[in-house]
Amino acid sequence: YMQGCRRVGCMPCIHARKSELAEIFQRWPEEIRRVAEWERLVAECSRHGNSTFFPSTHDPRRAEKRIEVITVDAYGIETYRDWALTTRGGMQFDLLAGMNDKAVCSSVYAGVCE
């Protein structure tokens, strides 16, 4: 919790919020690479040749239901990076976000940490 996530356990959680995804992309890029690799491995074994960590129907920018157009390249976890690192609305990047000191507590329960 002290590192900016509301849910702990699975990394990342399929129910992660946008702010949590941004924390994960910035603090733990190796976890994103791990999930991306699993997406590719499962897609190779999939009958339709695709597999994504997040459902394509929940994509915040372009939800898609047609299975034939869903690919790892178009809807995989790596495609969420730009969206997660934007401010509200998903279009404008927060230029000050990169200046945050990741050594300090960024808990959603701010002020509770010692």
Image: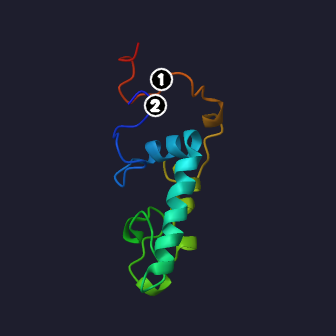
Question: Label 1: how many residues lie within 10 Å, few (<14), some (14-19) or many (20+)?
Answer: some
In the image, residue 101 sits, relative to residue 53, either above or below, namely: above
18 sits to left or right of 112: right
Mark 1 or 2, nearer chain start = 2
Which quadrant is home to the C terminus? top left
Secondary structure found at label 1 = loop
* Res. 20 mark: none
Mark 2 nearby-residue class (10 Å; few <14, some 14–19, many ≥20):
some
The picture places residue 16, in percent across and down from the top left corner, at 38, 49
Label 1 and label 2: CA atoms lie apart by 6 Å
CB-based contact (under 8 Å), mark 1 and mark 2? yes
Figure quadrant of the N terminus:
top left
Foreground residue among 83 and 1: 1
**How many labels, in total?**
2
- The quarter of the displayed image where residue 107 is located: top left
Q: Residue at x 40, y 37 (%)?
A: 5
- Disc number for residue 105: 1
Residue position marked by numbered label 2 in the rendering: 3
The coloring applied to the image is rainbow
Three-letter code, disc 2: Gln
Q: Residue at x 44, y 85 (%)?
A: 48
Above or below residue 97? Residue 35 is below
Decide: is 72 above or below 103: below
Q: Is residue 69 left or right of residue 7?
A: right
**Relative image position of residue 19 (x, y in whole percent):** 46, 42
Q: Is residue 48 left or right of residue 92?
A: left
**Residue 15 sits above or below residue 109 on the image:** below
